[in-house]
């Protein structure tokens, strides 16, 4: 992802009120995919991200769940409200 795109994603997420935790290098990836596909739960979302990134972002569903919880996106309704 180009640096410009990373900054614009961060800016948009902050405007939407999404708290970003920079502890994981894949945090923005998880948040972007969660907002793009709000219906799947953490297990399916982790599988989708793994397939979409050809395994470069292989996270467990527990890690995805924790990232979503920390950003306030743990429920489908929370993810839909940020769209």
Image (spheres, rainbow, N blue to C red):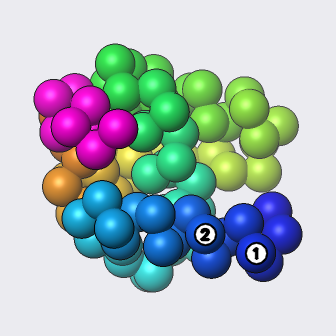
Residue 50 position, x and y percent, is 67, 36
Cα–Cα span, label 2 and label 1: 6 Å
Q: Residues within 10 Å of mark 2 (few under 14, many from 20)?
A: few
Main SS of the magenta part reads: helix
Q: Where 56 sits versus 46, above or below? A: below
Q: Where 11 sits versus 65, above or below? A: below
Residue 69 position, x and y percent, is 20, 53
Residue at horizontal 45%, vertical 80%?
22
Residue at horizontal 62%, vertical 76%?
7
- Front-most of residues 68 and 15: 15
What secondary structure is marked by label 1?
Answer: helix
Residue at horizontal 60%, vertical 26%?
48
Q: Which residues are magenta?
A: 76-83
Mark linked to residue 4? 1
CB under 8 Å between discs 2 and 1: yes
Q: Where 9 sits versus 61, above or below? A: below
Does residue 33 appear left or right of residue 67 in this picture?
A: right
Count of marks, rendered view: 2
Does residue 75 appear left or right of residue 19 in this picture?
A: left
Residue 5's quadrant in the figure?
bottom right
- Front-most of residues 49 and 73: 73
Residue 35 position, x and y percent, is 42, 39
What secondary structure is marked by label 2?
Answer: helix
Which residue corresponds to mark 2? 8
């Amino acid at each position: 992802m180009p640096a410009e795109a990373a900054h614009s994603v961060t800016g948009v997420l902050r405007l939407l009120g999404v708290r970003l935790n920079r502890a994981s290098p894949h945090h923005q990836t998880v948040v972007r995919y969660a907002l793009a596909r709000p219906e799947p739960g953490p297990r399916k979302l982790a599988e989708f991200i793994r397939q979409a990134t050809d395994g470069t972002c292989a996270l467990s569903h527990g890690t995805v769940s924790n990232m979503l919880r920390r950003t306030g996106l743990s429920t489908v309704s929370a993810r839909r409200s940020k769209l």
